[in-house]
Amino acid sequence: MRMCFLAMLLLMMGATICAQQQDVSISVVTIDGHPMITVSNGHSLAIEAFVISVDMPDTSDRFMIHYDVHSNFKHDTAIPPGGSQQVSLPRIVGKELPVPTLKAVVFSDGSILGDGSSAQDLLARRKILLARTEEVAALLRSMVTQKFSREQALAALQDAWKASKEAVAGSSPLERSWNDHVFYMATSNLEHIPSSGGNEQDISKLLNRVSRALDDWNADLKSARPGPPKMSAPDVSTLPSQFRH
């Protein structure tokens, strides 16, 4: 009787384990002539980030899609269990659809599945953005204290941006673009104010507003699991278009 009960328990445990091995899959659909990638989450945890490589038809061109609720703060959203997310692809006329490959997935608990180098790209992006959001937010706050004009603020941002570019000159083009992103955001906000307009109080309010937005982004990056420092990730690249967890 005890052996029978033990056998039944093992069978139940096996069924539970099998039920938890759900797919994260991708597919390409065409909506109004525009190709879209659909990422479907069959796992019990939400997906917070993924990397997809896309091979263009009839060419050797390849580009990467980095989707991340922390790097793309308040733009990308987590994919809940049973949910899906669509990502746009370039319109291809008279050619085959682009071929996407799911490279890595990061779940809400910080677990990583997929190609290790692709996952490290996601973490490297978070690390760069964490440093830049902290740096630029502090710079903007110092401008408020010193009562900078619009022109002074733009000049200080350009100088800091130039120094940052020089510091990462030996990095990959992708890393350089991530490094530029925060400076571009802060600069474009200031450039919306005409050079002849905006008094000191208006400029200070804008600088405070942008610095608070960067502080919020920085706090979100710090809360990310796994965090931005370099971490080891499994290299499980046997499935090109879907993963099991």
Image (spheres, rainbow, N blue to C red):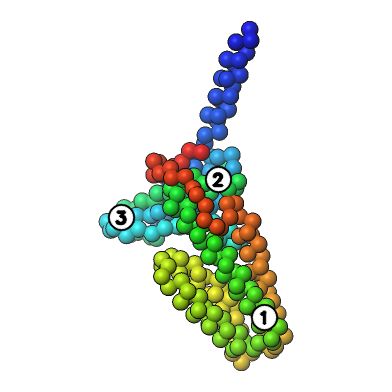
Depth order, front residue of 130/67: 130
Residue that carries the numbered disc 2 in the rendered image = 111
Left or right of 86 on screen, residue 206 = right
Q: How many marks?
A: 3
| 186 lies above or below 70 | below
Q: Nearer the viewer, mark 2 or mark 3?
A: 2
- The spot of residue 184 in percent (x, y) is 53, 75
The residue under label 1 is 142
The residues bearing labels 1 and 2 have C-alpha atoms spaced at a distance of: 38 Å
Residue in the image at 54% along x and 79% along y: 160
**Observer able to see residue 207:** no
Residue hosting label 3? 57
Going from N to C along the chain, the mark reached first, 2 or 3, is: 3
Which one is nearer the viewer's eye here, 196 or 222? 222
Residue lying at the far left in this picture: please name it.
58
- Amino acid at the residue labelled 3: Pro
